[in-house]
Amino acid sequence: MVKAVVAGASGGIGQPLSLLLKACPLVDKLALYDVVNTPGVAADLSHISSVAQIEGFLPADDGLKKAFTGADIVVIPAGIPRKPGMTRDDLFKINAGIVKGLIEGVAQFCPDAYVLVISNPVNSTVPIAAEVLKKANKFNPQKLFGVTTLDVVRAETFVQGITGEKDPAKTVIPVIGGHSGETIVPLFSQAKPAVNIPADKLDALTNRVQFGGDEVVKAKDGAGSATLSMAYAGFRFAEKLLKAANGESGVIEPTFVYLPGVPGGDAIAKETGLEYFSVPVELGKEGAKQAHNPIPSANDYEKKLLQACYDGLKGNISKGVEFVANPP
Ligand code: NAI
């Protein structure tokens, strides 16, 4: 019996993500939570003839409590998206408070759930989530995940333009670091099967993975950022986690975690000087079962990228920690 919650379910990401979860046979119960429109979205999806029983909740009448109680997995795409000219960090002011409030709900009503944070800036909202849970004495680092899967999905897709491989998802590419601009570090040298990227194409390819989100923001021209590809990516991560929780072994996906609390994470924290970082993580019933460290095998080109990543991430992380320690 698996109960899933989408918080921010009426939004651009929330609706297609809720659709994918409603259609997923691993989900028995689906609760949609948002500050607007969930009755309509839930009524619409409820006509789909799949296993999951679905209900929509608004803040009134204890909606948060009803939506979150008994949840096994909470996926959070609540918050404002970027418009042209904005960085993910520009979203901090509004989204930090939204994530804080929702995580307080997790701490109170479903502290044992896996929590998947999509709301940007992920580099800061995940530390916010951790700090809120710590304060409530409910922090289980193995169950808190920043969703960086869209960066992985983009790397798989864009590299296909060079390799010509028919199914892009068959190439496994570790994308590590954070989730914004130069904190995103694709390790093409560790792709499996190996890919041969001509030296004169590597810069452009790397840059496209780091700033691919901008292409969508620009093309949408004021109507928001990636929603459909993000819903796909968020669902891919959630589905992998649910499969691993069901006993499937060898499920590995990069995700942004609190390193000191995940087996194998300490060495990576030491090497990077950071407590939060995205690395390939083996998933299991306990959540993040084992963090893998691809950094020692990175080549010189990638090591240079990593240096810029560390510098950027450091500030993003402390901004999140600070937000909870000294609320504005
Ligand atoms: P959207 O504006 O279409 O939807 C956001 C939804 O959150 C709205 O329905 C809104 O009513 C809801 N919401 C606001 N405050 C809430 C609260 N306190 N509780 C529950 N729901 C609340 O935005 P979109 O495009 O769906 O993006 C959502 C977030 O995801 C943004 O922060 C965006 O930057 C981020 N994002 C993250 C990506 C990633 O790779 N992790 C990729 C793309 C977007």
Image: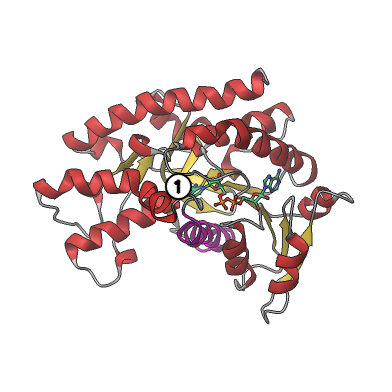
Extent of the magenta region: 226-248
User: What x and y, as percent, mark residue 328?
Assistant: 67, 20
Question: What residue is at 19 percent from the left and 57 percent from the top?
Answer: 194
Which residue sits furthest right? 61
Whether residue 253 is visible here, answered yes or no, is no
Q: How many marks?
A: 1
- Give above or below for 319 relative to 37: above
With 210 as the anchor, is 132 left or right in this view?
right
Which residue sits furthest top? 326
Give yes or no for residue 227 being in the magenta stretch: yes
Give yes or no for residue 316 being in the magenta stretch: no
User: What x and y, as percent, mark residue 217?
Assistant: 42, 49
User: What x and y, as percent, mark residue 266?
Assistant: 45, 30
- Which image quadrant: the N terminus? bottom right
Question: What residue is at 58 percent from the left and 24 percent from the top?
Answer: 321
Amino acid under label 1?
A: Thr
With 309 as the anchor, is 227 left or right in this view?
right
Question: What residue is at 69 percent from the left and 72 percent from the top?
Answer: 45
With 111 as the anchor, is 147 left or right in this view?
left
User: What x and y, as percent, mark residue 234?
Assistant: 52, 56
Q: Residues within 10 Å of mark 1 (few under 14, many from 20)?
A: many
Which residue sits furthest front? 221
The image quadrant of residue 105 is top right
- Give above or below for 115 relative to 237: above
- Give above or below for 182 relative to 79: above
Magenta region, main secondary structure:
helix
Residue placed most toward the observer, 301 or 250: 301
Whether residue 125 is visible here, answered yes or no, is yes
Mark 1 CB in 8 Å range of ligand 1? yes
Q: Which residue is mark 1?
A: 148
